[in-house]
Amino acid sequence: MTVAVPGSIAALPRVVGAALRVPLVTGERVEYANLDHAASAPCLEQVRDAVNELLPWYASVHRGAGFASRVSTRVYEQARDSVRRFLGARPSDTVVFTRNTTDSLNLLARSLPRRTSVVLFDTEHHAALLPWRGPNVRRLRTPATPAAAVLELDRALRATPEGPRLVVVTGASNVTGEVWPVAELAAVARRHGARIALDAAQLAPHRPVDLRALDVDYAVLSGHKVYAPFGAGVLVGRADWLQAADPYLVGGGATARVTDHGDRLGVAWSAVPERHEAGSPNVVGVHALAVACDVLGRHWEQTVAHERELLSRLRAGLATVPGVRELALFGSAHDRVGVVSFVVGGQDAGFLAAALSAEHGIGVRDGAFCAHVAVHRLAEGDRALRASLGLGTTVGHVDRLVAALRSLVVEGPRSDYRIVDGRWEPVDDDRALPPFLR
């Protein structure tokens, strides 16, 4: 099913829960305004339908002789082709299925050749910031402009010892939504003989990603960010480092042959991608991810136009709310996807998020968004608010957020709040949970 884009004859894929109504502390029920897509996007209706279609056929994969096993194996392996198309991967690139972006980047970190030098900017998401440890890792402070970032990377690579090198960069900041100059950074990496890994978790739900056009060696993303919340992620890229590395996990599927030599076991590991996919794979999650990739790939023009219209409206609206200051790495005019983080002078971000939910039925994110260095630097503190847009967002959701935030700032909340276990919540909150939680 599709939904018309305001002011356009185009259509967007629909998400599950678009008509969800949630209770308020006032006793009313309103349509939920989900402005937290950057954390986890809702499920596409096409993905839900595809999962339901697969479930009767779900069975073991790769070594099952039964017909259902053959079907599940075909589904699992065809998913690699969908992901490869979605990311514009090279025919020789391997596609390794993981749990999520964090899992993918940790797998890549475990697969680097010895003494690989790693260069990255310190404002990355923790998934991209933390897996690289040791004396060969150089973290760069993010400069004020994309051009300065390119120059800083060039200087850093000039000072990097000879040997294998890897640059790690995000496609779009999960804090500010700003799009990074990936192609330009990749060109610098090439000049210095370095490889480059792209964290596409925030970029891939909003813009096309083409590894060949960007000249990127590796890309990672999470299904739950691209409207397929069934527990799958992916690492796509050059096979040689992954093939030469010990398996990320050891167990069934990663082994081609195990032999008994008395006091020890002899193990011949499988080739990639199976080498790093030990255990029973998440067939349902992988199929969901593949379907989401196929659906998004058919709707880029509409998706980008939809989000740009809403993002412009959101930023303009927030600028009218007293005390709001939008966070930016590169400046307010820089290109960005549908993610906006901001602080409100004199207001606690956690309190505002709680009141927006309890009194207005609006879901936003508060805190440091697993990017503590970036948020602490930009917000001059440890917490901010983040509103993030996606296929499930409407003009009404954006306008409600702006109006509700203005009301809270100017008039104050209508309910009393307290801190419980470090989080704000209404003092009198008798909202009923959905039946499956009771």
Image (cartoon, grey):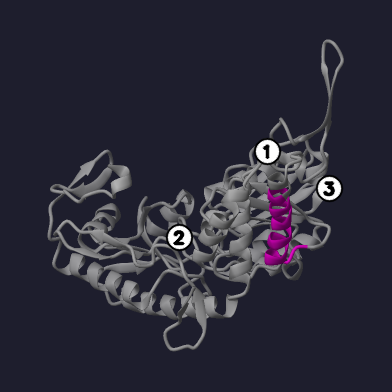
Task: Residue 403: give x, y in percent of width and height.
Answer: 24, 73
Label of residue 42 in the image? 2
Local packing at callout 3 (Cα closer than 10 Å; few below 14, some 14-19, many 20+) is few
Label of residue 240 in the image? 3
Q: What is the secondary structure assignment of the residue under circle 2?
A: loop
Badge 3 or badge 2: first in the primary sequence: 2
Looking at the picture, tell me which residue is in the foreground, 408 or 121: 408
Task: Residue 192: give x, y in percent of width and height.
Answer: 80, 58
Task: Residue 57: give x, y in percent of width and height.
Answer: 63, 49
Residue 333 visible to the viewer: no
Residue extent of the magenta highlight: 71-89
Looking at the picture, tell me which residue is in the foreground, 434 or 151: 434
Q: Using the rendered view, name the quadrant where residue 324 is placed.
A: bottom left
Real-space Cα distance between discs 1 and 3? 24 Å
Looking at the picture, tell me which residue is in the foreground, 276 or 106: 276
Q: Which residue is mark 1?
A: 135
Identity of the residue furthest to the top in this view: 263
Q: What is the secondary structure assignment of the residue under circle 1?
A: loop
Query: As displayed, is residue 314 above or below residue 371?
Result: below
Residue 223 inside the magenta-drawn segment: no
Instruction: Report if the CB atoms under discs 1 and 3 are less than 8 Å apart.
Output: no
- Which kind of residue does numbered mark 2 sit on? Pro
Label of residue 239 in the image? none
